Image (cartoon, grey):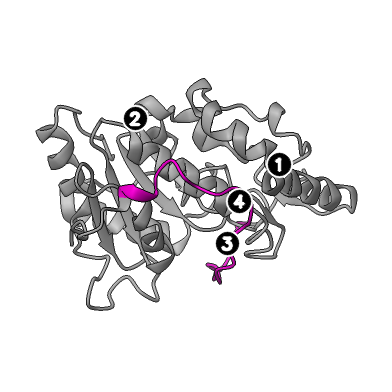
């Protein structure tokens, strides 16, 4: 269902995000789904310096104040410490979503939570897995709803690069995780940054669609100006919630409704297939 603006617009929070203190919300995680690995080590993070992580240029005015803040400095120190301790951290490019989808090109935002924590799974895009990795259950349900909604057959693999390149921002709220340890980098500062990224998209004049699946994503609805953007909510596509009332994911029709909104506002449509 579409989320309607409250009497006090969510946009009042934009432009005043505090980078000083990370939020302290509780986070869950999806189980890992990994095909047998080869002998080669899985790609992993090797550099904790965000200056070396590729991003589209127009995200930098959002990123720079964060990395200069106490929270951003603390996050960098944490990543350096974990790498020095030998931790295996995924994905190898934490900000790949910001590299593939420039701020000016965003048409749809899909919020995830935590990168996949199995070897070779995470590729820096929410819900997406690298080619050759078995499609996880939540993504299978996304493909199932896409087929029910628009008649699009399931993709050959679970990589969503084709969506990112069309302006679908596939953003996790925590951008790194340690091997086998879901939510291990939650509440370390990532959420402060990703909230600022969501607010930056909302602040733009071009109408966008925000797909908020599950309570974790829906908590970010406060950052979105629902007077100008379309906000659609449903349960998380996880098998535990996808069919559960009152807002089951299966049957939500969000992919078609997103395209309808984009066409009506002169922004084309997403080729979801």
Tag 3 secondary structure: loop
Extreme left residue here? 264
Crowding around mark 1 (Cα neighbors within 10 Å: few <14, some 14 to 19, many 20+) is: some
Q: Specify whether residue 240 is painted magenta.
A: no
Residue drawn where x is 51% and y is 51% of the image: 172
Mark 4 or 3: in front is: 3
User: Which residue in the protein does label 1 denote?
Assistant: 43
Q: Earlier in the sequence, mark 3 or mark 2?
A: 3
How far across and down, in percent of the image, does residue 219 sit? 40, 63
Residue drawn where x is 39% and y is 44% of the image: 14
Contact (CB < 8 A) between labels 4 and 2? Answer: no
User: Which residue in the protein does label 2 denote?
Assistant: 166
Q: CA distance from mark 3 to mark 1?
A: 29 Å
Q: Main secondary structure of the magenta part?
A: loop
Mark 1 or 2: in front is: 2
Tag 4 secondary structure: helix
Tag 1 secondary structure: loop
Q: Earlier in the sequence, mark 3 or mark 1?
A: 3
Residue drawn where x is 68% and y is 44% of the image: 72
User: Which residue in the protein does label 4 denote?
Assistant: 190
> Observer-nearest residue: 185 or 268?
185
């Amino acid at each position: 269902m579409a989320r309607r603006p409250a009497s006090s617009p969510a946009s009042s929070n934009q432009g005043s995000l505090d980078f000083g203190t990370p939020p302290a919300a509780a986070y869950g995680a999806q189980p890992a789904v990994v095909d047998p690995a080869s002998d080669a080590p899985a790609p992993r993070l090797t550099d904790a310096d965000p200056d070396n992580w590729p991003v589209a240029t127009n995200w930098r005015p959002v990123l720079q104040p964060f990395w200069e803040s106490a929270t951003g400095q603390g996050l960098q120190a944490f990543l350096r410490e974990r790498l020095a301790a030998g931790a295996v951290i995924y994905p190898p490019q934490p900000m790949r979503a910001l590299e593939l989808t420039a701020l000016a090109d965003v048409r749809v935002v899909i919020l995830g939570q935590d990168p996949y924590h199995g070897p070779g799974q995470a590729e820096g895009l929410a819900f997406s897995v690298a080619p050759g990795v078995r499609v996880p259950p939540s993504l299978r349900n996304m493909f199932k709803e896409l087929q029910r909604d628009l008649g699009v057959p399931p993709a050959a693999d679970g990589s969503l690069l084709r969506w990112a390149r069309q302006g679908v921002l596939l953003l996790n709220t925590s951008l790194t995780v340690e091997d086998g340890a879901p939510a291990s980098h939650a509440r370390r500062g990532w959420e402060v940054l990703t909230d600022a990224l969501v607010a930056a998209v909302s602040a733009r004049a071009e109408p966008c669609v925000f797909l908020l699946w599950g309570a974790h994503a829906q908590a970010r609805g406060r950052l979105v100006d629902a007077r100008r953007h379309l906000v659609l909510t449903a349960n998380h596509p996880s098998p535990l919630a996808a069919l559960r009332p009152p807002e089951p994911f299966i049957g939500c029709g969000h992919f078609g409704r997103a395209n309808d909104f984009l066409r009506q506002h002169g922004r084309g449509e997403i080729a979801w297939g």
